[in-house]
Image (cartoon, rainbow, N blue to C red):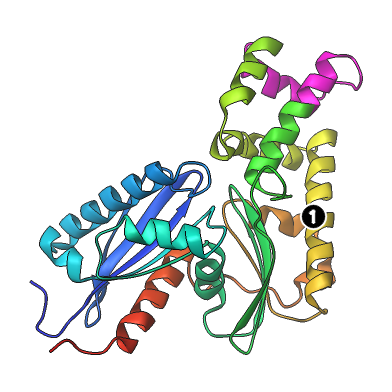
Amino acid sequence: MIKSGSTVIIGVDGGGTGCRVAIGTSTDGVLSRAEGGRANAASDAALAVKNIASTVEEAARLAGIPTSALSHATAHIGIAGILGAEDSARIASALPYKTITVTDDRPTAVTGALGRHDGYLLSLGTGAFAAASQAGVFTFLGGWGFYVADQGSGAWLGRAGLEQVMLCHDGLVDHTPLTRALFEKFGGDPNALVSFSMTAKPGDFATLAPDIIAGAQAADPWGQAIMKKGANHLMRCLARLGFRTGDTLCLTGGIGPHYAGYLPEDFLSGRIQPKGSALDGAFQLASSNATQQPESN
């Protein structure tokens, strides 16, 4: 039962490989979490809305919150693929919650990882971006999506792996154990690989990233080379943001921490573990929004 005067709070973190929801109340905090399907506004906005709604309902069920209470909830939706106010408004209008803030997934990631503290964030999952937080002001680099950016991300690694496989198949570069293993995923058939690439979403490419990371850890020369290339891009981003040795730095996402071994040691002297996840950040932002809402008569 929801306590009198309490507001239902919903935090959503969505990306190319899945949607995560935390639900609770303004008095009790997070009560349950649930995971669902993809939620990328640029790739498929309708699917993103459908997956968010169904995952929120599942989280509410687990928390014992009636579905009818969701229409009075305050939500912060942080999802990949939001390119401006128009996209935010479109997603918000399609969801049934009373108060909804929709942003891309960068503010939630920074809030979750750094809290209210100054520092720098390298967030690499299916997509990627770099950020600085100074006195509550966020500055972002990247996060423009797989087709034109997201260097170093899981999707970027996966696509790079398949590109290298095709170069090897054409005899332009030599195979390594990693590229052979990647090729075997398609039965050694270049046409099967090309067919996959024609319909693959960023999240599909990202499913290959663990193989590339593992290959690099096993000293595969191509695997190490592509991880170093990604790390070089991340170092340029930090330099552009004003990062200096000793500054607070956090590496997050499924891919981010794996770059620690490819960054200079002095870059890592101020490294911290994330204070929370992007989902934690979404819930925190939703909670802040709820406290700023005027009470209903």
Q: Would residue 22 be found to the left or right of residue 278 on screen?
A: left
Report if residue 127 is visible in the image: yes
**Along the viewing direction, whichever of 194 and 89 lies nearer the viewer:** 89
Q: Residues within 10 Å of mark 1 (few under 14, many from 20)?
A: many
- Element carrying mark 1: helix
Q: Would residue 81 be found to the left or right of residue 261 on screen?
A: left
In the rendered image, which residue does mark 1 sit on? 231
**Along the viewing direction, whichever of 65 and 142 lies nearer the viewer:** 142
Q: Is residue 279 above or below residue 51?
A: below
Report if residue 213 is visible in the image: no
Whether the magenta-drawn stretch holds residue 179 is answered as: yes
Q: Is residue 125 above or below residue 60?
A: above
**In the rendered structure, which segment of residues is drawn in magenta?**
164-189
Q: Is residue 78 above or below residue 185?
A: below
Q: Would residue 40 be found to the left or right of residue 93 on screen?
A: right
**Residue at image coords 70%, 40%:** 157
**Residue furthest right as drawn:** 172
Amino acid residing under circle 1: Ala
Q: Quadrant of the C terminus?
A: bottom left
Q: Would residue 166 be found to the left or right of residue 103 on screen?
A: right
Q: Quadrant of the N terminus?
A: bottom left
Q: Give how far across and how far down residue 57 sits, in percent.
A: 22, 54
**Residue at image coords 36%, 75%:** 286
